[in-house]
Amino acid sequence: MWSRLSGWLPALCVGIIVCVYVWAQARYLTPGCSEVDTAGYLALAERMEQGEPLAQPDDDIFIHQDHVWVENQRGETIPKYTPGLPALMALGLRLHGESGAFAVSPVAGALALVGAYLLFHLWMSRWAAVLALLALAFNPMYRVYTDYPLAHAADLCCITWGMYFL
């Protein structure tokens, strides 16, 4: 009986860990911009989702006074960020509105957890990989960075899966 359980029980534990992580992120996620960086990502995502030019002229000299915005030779302003996360946020906007844009980081965090388990399992036993995943999933810094609408969670997800498939 133990041999049958040892095959699927770690996978069940991984599923439970990821589900608890998703529940906690969904329960405590507050869709909103708490700083200028997240506002820049969201502004670029909204431009992408609406099919607008990414760089736009703006006559209001006071609206773009922080480090997020750059001005090109034509006098148009654009957020300084690469378009990867804003493209994912634009997809979230299209599918679920503004809350979909803010769900990109927690979803990327959940996908990174699955990839992390598979990556851990390449180096250690199933049960050690489950314990490592448990430590990662409920690490406060992991939870903060995968809840925050910056590129950290999407980067982590891509890097984790990239390392796994190497």
Image (cartoon, rainbow, N blue to C red):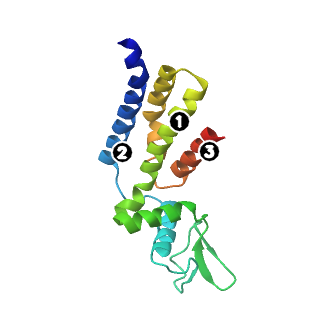
Q: Residues within 10 Å of mark 2 (few under 14, many from 20)?
A: many
Q: Are marks 2 and 3 in contact (CB under 8 Å)?
A: no
Q: Residue at x 54, y 20 (%)?
A: 125
Q: Are marks 1 and 2 in contact (CB under 8 Å)?
A: no
Image quadrant holding the C terminus, namely top right
Q: Is residue 70 visible?
A: yes
Give above or below for 87 relative to 61.
above
Residue hosting label 3: 162
Q: Position of residue 22 (x, y in %)?
A: 36, 43
Q: Secondary structure at mark 1?
A: helix
Amino acid at the residue labelled 3: Gly
Q: Residues within 10 Å of mark 3 (few under 14, many from 20)?
A: few
Give above or below for 141 relative to 13.
below
Q: Position of residue 3 (x, y in %)?
A: 41, 14
Q: Secondary structure at mark 2?
A: helix
Picture disc at residue 116:
1
Residue hosting label 2: 25
- Given this view, does label 2 or label 3 mark the residue nearer the observer? 3
Give above or below for 30 relative to 76.
above
- Residue 72, quarter of picture: bottom right
Q: Position of residue 67 (x, y in %)?
A: 60, 65
Q: Residue at x 46, y 52 (%)?
A: 105
- Given this view, does label 1 or label 2 mark the residue nearer the observer? 1
Going from the N terminus, do you reach mark 2 or mark 3 first? 2
Q: Is residue 148 visible?
A: no
